[in-house]
Every structure is written in C-alpha cells, then in structure tokens.
Image (cartoon, rainbow, N blue to C red):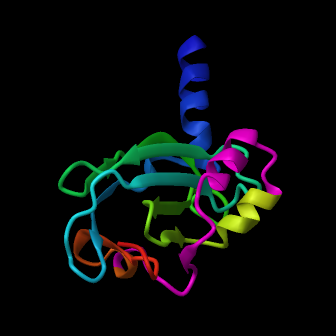
C-alpha cells in the first residue's frame, strides 16, 4: 500500500501535464564593455542585472546581481537553472526577463530591458532593494527595450558605451 501511494504521488504531476525538467531562470551575461567610438575596453564599469519572471509583474521574486568590468572590460554574471515541475503552457514555465544596466562616469548608461521597462519595475515593485538598485543607475541613459534583442544590443559579446559630450 505504501509503495502505491509513493507511485501515485510521483506520477500525479505527470497526469496533470506537469513535467520535471531544468529551466533557465536567469540568462548568463558574458560580455566585454567597450568605448563606442574607440573600441577600447572600459575597466571598472558598473554592471547591474535584475531578473524577474515575466509572470511576476511586480518582480517580487526577482534576482539582483551586481558586478564590475575587469581591466580588459570583461564581465561575467552567472546564469541560473532550476529544476522543478513545470506545466507546458502559458504561465507554467518561468520566462526570465533581464534588465541589464552598464555605466561608468563620463558615459551614458546602457539600459537593456528585455520585456517591459525598467521604470515600470521601479514603480511597481514593493521591494526596497530593487528600487535602490535601479536608483543607482545614472539618469543619462541610452535605453534599449522591447524592440531590441539581447544579441543585437550585445552584438559580438560587446556592450558599447557612448561618451557624454564634453567628457574626456
């Protein structure tokens, strides 16, 4: 009887259409930050990534990662894969929405928002840490939103920062 109960509990998610498998919940970031005009690497640039599930409209379960570029302008931010029971349908599988900001003094901040707008997350999230993280990003920004693909903005594994006029 005990074995039947364990078998039933094990198979019950499959009967509802759920499957146990790994899902990427945060995309890894492995890029080189360069000056848009000269192509030279930018050391010490700040990198902020906020990952929210597209179904988590207020980013209550979001993840915040901070880093800086090394002397050659490279930065790596780890991804995340989680195992779980997922339903193959709308809302049943986590879909990460990456918000990535890169900035350094003298340059416009590059802000990439995969789905939606980073301002919406700032306004709708009740999480103090997310609001504070977004407020760290300088207001002089070049924004890339829904119309841009991650691979397009970070073409060739590079993020290009544009110098502010008058900055040397």
Please tell me which residue is depicted at 54% across the width and 71% down the height of the picture: 114
Rendering quarter of residue 80: top left
| Vertical position of residue 155 compared to residue 100: above or below | below
Q: Does the segment drawn in magenta span residue 86? A: no
- Which of these two is toward me, 74 or 82? 74
Q: Quadrant of the N terminus?
A: top right
Does any portion of residue 97 appear in the rendered image? yes
Please tell me which residue is depicted at 21% across the width and 79% down the height of the picture: 38
On the image, the x and y values in percent for residue 17 come to 59, 54
For this view, does 140 lie left or right of residue 22? Answer: right
- Which of these two is toward me, 67 or 43? 43
Rendering quarter of residue 116: bottom right
On the image, the x and y values in percent for residue 7 come to 53, 27
For this view, does 60 lie left or right of residue 40? Answer: right
Q: Give the range drawn in magenta.
A: 124-151
Q: Does the segment drawn in magenta span residue 131? A: yes
Residue at the top extreme, as displayed: 2
Residue at the bottom extreme, as displayed: 147
For this view, does 124 lie left or right of residue 168? Answer: right
């Amino acid at each position: 009887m005990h074995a039947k109960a364990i078998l039933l509990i094990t198979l019950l998610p499959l009967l509802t259409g759920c499957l146990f498998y790994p899902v990427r919940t945060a995309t890894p970031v492995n890029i080189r930050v360069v000056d848009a005009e000269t192509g030279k690497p930018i050391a010490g640039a700040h990198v902020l990534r906020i990952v929210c599930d597209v179904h988590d409209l207020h980013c209550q379960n979001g993840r915040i990662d901070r880093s800086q570029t090394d002397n050659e302008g490279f930065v790596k931010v780890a991804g995340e894969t989680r195992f779980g029971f997922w339903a193959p349908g709308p809302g049943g599988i986590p879909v990460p929405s990456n918000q990535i900001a890169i900035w350094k003094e003298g340059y416009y901040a590059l802000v990439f928002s995969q789905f939606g707008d980073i301002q919406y997350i700032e306004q709708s999230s009740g999480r103090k840490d997310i609001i504070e993280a977004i407020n760290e990003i300088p207001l002089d920004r070049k924004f890339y939103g829904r119309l841009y693909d991650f691979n397009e903005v970070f073409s060739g594994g590079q993020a290009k920062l544009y110098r502010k006029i008058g900055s040397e």
